[in-house]
Amino acid sequence: MEAVFSYIIGLGAAVMMPIIFTILGVCIGIKFGKALKSGLLVGVGFVGLSVVTALLTSSLGDPLKKVTEIYGLSLGIFDMGWPAAAAVAYNTSVGAFIIPVCLAVNIVMLLTKTTRTVNIDLWNYWHFAFIGAVVYFASDSILWGFFAAIICYIITLVMADLTAPKFQKYYDKMEGISIPQPFCQGFVPFAVVINKVLDFIPGFDKLNIDAEGMKKKFGIMGEPLFLGVLVGCAIGALACRNGQELVDGIPGILGLGIKMGAVMELIPRITSLFIEGLKPISDATRELVAKKFKNSAGLHIGMSPALVIGHPTTLVVSLLLIPVILFLSVVLPGNQFLPLASLAGMFYLFPAVLPITKGNVLKTFIIGLVALIVGLYFVTNLAQFFTLAATDVYLKTGDSAVAVPQGFQAGALDFASSLFAFVIFHLTHTLKVVGPIILVAGTLAMAIYNRYRIVRGKE
């Protein structure tokens, strides 16, 4: 089974999703040709997104390394980035069986009406494997590892249901879609609390500027394209040691600016492919559910947040946070994590936050800033345990992508910076008996409440 599921994961999201969507489309009554086209469009979307994010990380990689060298910004935790973190998670004993275990849990929850989400975002199951692997290596118990992973999965499915109405209302053409990714859902509590606090500040409501409002107010300077060019050029300039290097490096500085601008412009165009591929599946699912379950509110298809990361507010806020969080990661006392390879994952912080802030750029920026500052300490705290998992996987596989440089610990912004990862880990591992009891009680309470909403049709 380990070999089978390792092979499936090795196909990648770009191959897995067309297959899944084609089979799903045929099963719900769509003609094979139309289902195949829907699946291929989603697959093409993933390919395009991986190309653009690779452009972002490769373009920023060398300049940011030079900046860290020039200003002495080296810290003790090496940023592995999400691809390496996913490889570590899937190549542990927990990760090898995470897909069948989580799918079984999903089926049980659907049958007991404790969720409405069918989570087909199989590639992002690595987040559940991640927390399971960290607990496994910290406690030296495979059972506690699966316990942590399953608890995280159940909480995420319930959160996906709770956030689905606002998510579908805010984003166009997302009917019947929910986001069961724990990294995204882990920031929802921050968003709810901070958004409420900001609403109590007198006059703050007058600062309600969304991405479209920025374009009207600042013209071209409010465009993600222009901001991308500006931030790219600024980082390129910082990577120069002196005035002569600055003059000589003008072509490279301008080139980096154009590449950053290209990323900001291309992401929305690529994410439109996801929507085009999803629409036939989503429409057919709603029609089928309406016929078969007339008294039911229907089901949600759990999908990757990649569908909506092209929103202008997400792009603008992510771009503005990159230099800010780099600076803060160095000056914050006690933090040992400098995010570099993980910066491409910053876009995924906001898909579930925007429906709460209604796209308000300032609110979203503040929420993102607070969440990331706290997240840096979460990564620092979990690094020693994630390093155990990464080292074990490297010794078994010999994969240089997961090798931890000597003298460093391993970390990644993706999921390690999530509230879910931190809380579940410490309640499972640190508090021993009391912690797991709290987790089970809290998770059951969430599931029962969600069942009440589903049965009573509260959405």
Image (cartoon, helix red, strand yellow):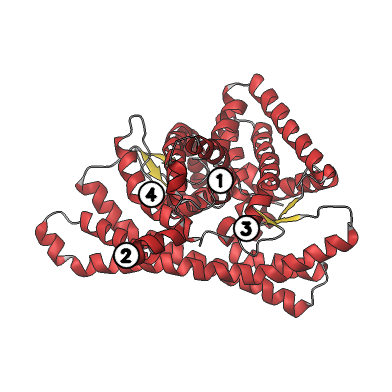
Q: Which residue is mark 3?
A: 9
Q: Amino acid at mark 3?
A: Ile
Q: Is residue 354 visible?
A: yes
What amino acid is labelled 2 in the image?
A: Val
Q: Mark 2 = which residue?
A: 229
Cα–Cα span, label 2 and label 1: 28 Å
Q: Looking at the picture, which amino acid does disc 4 mark?
A: Leu
User: Quick one: 132 or 174, which is closer to the camera?
Assistant: 174
Q: Position of residue 37 (x, y in %)?
A: 68, 77
Q: N-terminal of the two: label 2 or label 1?
A: 1
Residue 321's label in the rendered image is 4
Query: Which residue does the image show at 65% across and 39% down from the upper left?
Result: 152
Closer to the chain start, of discs 4 and 1, is 1
Q: Residues within 10 Å of mark 1 (few under 14, many from 20)?
A: many
Choose the circle earlier in sequence order: 4 or 3. Answer: 3
Picture coordinates of residue 45, whole percent (x, y): 56, 69
Q: Is residue 283 left or right of residue 202?
A: right
In percent of width and height, residue 260 lies at 36, 64
Q: Earlier in the sequence, mark 2 or mark 4?
A: 2
